[in-house]
Image: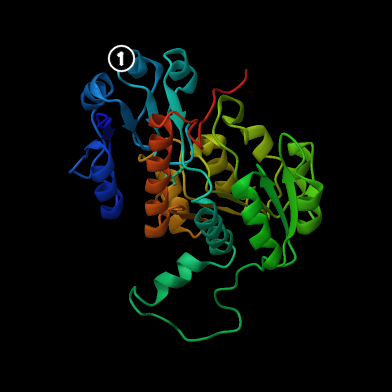
Amino acid sequence: AKKKPLVVITRKLPDPVETRMRELFDARLNVEDRPMSHDELVAAVREADVLVPTITDTIDAALIGEAGENLKLIANFGNGVDKIDIAAAAKRGIAVTNTPNVLTEDTADMTMALMLAVPRRLAEGANVLPGDKKWPGWSPTWMLGRRIGGKRLGIVGMGRIGTAVARRAKAFGLSIHYHNRHRVLQAVEDELEATYWESLDQMLARMDIISVNCPSTPATFHLLSARRLALMQPTSYIVNTARGDIIDEDALVKLIQDGKIAGAGLDVYENEPALNTKLLKLAARGKVVLLPHMSSATLEGRIDMGEKVIINIRAFFDGHRPPDRVLPLRT
Ligand code: 8YV
């Protein structure tokens, strides 16, 4: 029988995934639920045939430089591959895969939750009863938020997740606008009655809500720069379930503090897990709702992600092209 590949998994995964990994591979599982240290990562890439990292691991060119001869595949447990230097891996003949599709719907669901949370004051309201129970009772003028139906939603990045957000938002009565590197299929535009904006600047200036759904790449770093954010309406909101570094976070904080953007619903941050303390102050004032990077966090989704990782590893070692191969960006 063929020797089973040594697969090092950097984080604790749901039990069914670990069980299957153990059956199929010489799986080295991380029993402690904490990110690997740099030294542990170096040891892993020196020895493993396959590395299964997550977003909490930085797989940069220096780490890839430490890779042993066996390492042939980095099978990311996650969709976003911004922490992996794919070009450096390619140079060493190491393939990279990710886990698309299976977290699209969960992420879009949570994007809707954040889209409602700030305008409809969900977090503030949810705190009234469990707190000191000082509910004065119903009043015609109390806890008034802003309606989202009838408003304009501008989606930055109309890929799988952006499209899933658009479908939901349309059902909530929002009109759909988007900016993307290229136009989506006519059939999709027709279904969503979506308006394409070639100019991100022009779209930002005209929307009531912006949702960030593009990947983090060198080209999208601070795509929502101070200058661009300043184009937004003072009554507008921004939601980010993609990556923190797509928005200039300091600039966003300042604009919300100054009343030039109405608020934000954020699931991702520039320096996770560290948090800008000014954001916490804005949260206390109900201006922002902050979630701890949990938009794809469902048990079903995590099991599906594990399944995808397994399929990619098996396809690779059976001599096939893994279904979720990620190629280096063209520059
Ligand atoms: C993942 C994510 O859970 O898949 C992504 O891109 O942002 C997360 O929701 C995480 O990346 C796991 O590595």
Q: Within the image, what quadrant is residue 76 found in?
A: top left
Does residue 124 sit above or below 239 in this rendering? below
In the image: residue 63, left or right of residue 200: left
Q: Position of residue 315 (x, y in %)?
A: 43, 35
Q: Position of residue 301 (x, y in %)?
A: 42, 54
**Total marks in image:** 1
Q: Helix, strand, or loop for circle 1? A: loop
Does residue 88 sit above or below 322 in this rendering? above
In the image: residue 44, left or right of residue 218: left
Question: In percent of the image, x 58 and y 53: which residue is there?
Answer: 263
For the N terminus, the image quarter is top left
In the image: residue 232, left or right of residue 55: right
**192 or 236, nearer to the observer:** 192
The answer to whether any part of residue 258 appears in the image is no
Question: In percent of the image, x 41 and y 20: which residue is there?
Answer: 94
The answer to whether any part of residue 66 appears in the image is yes
- Mark 1, residue position: 69
In which of the image's four quarters is ligand 1 placed?
A: top left
Does residue 199 sit above or below 138 in this rendering? above
**52 or 70, nearer to the observer:** 70
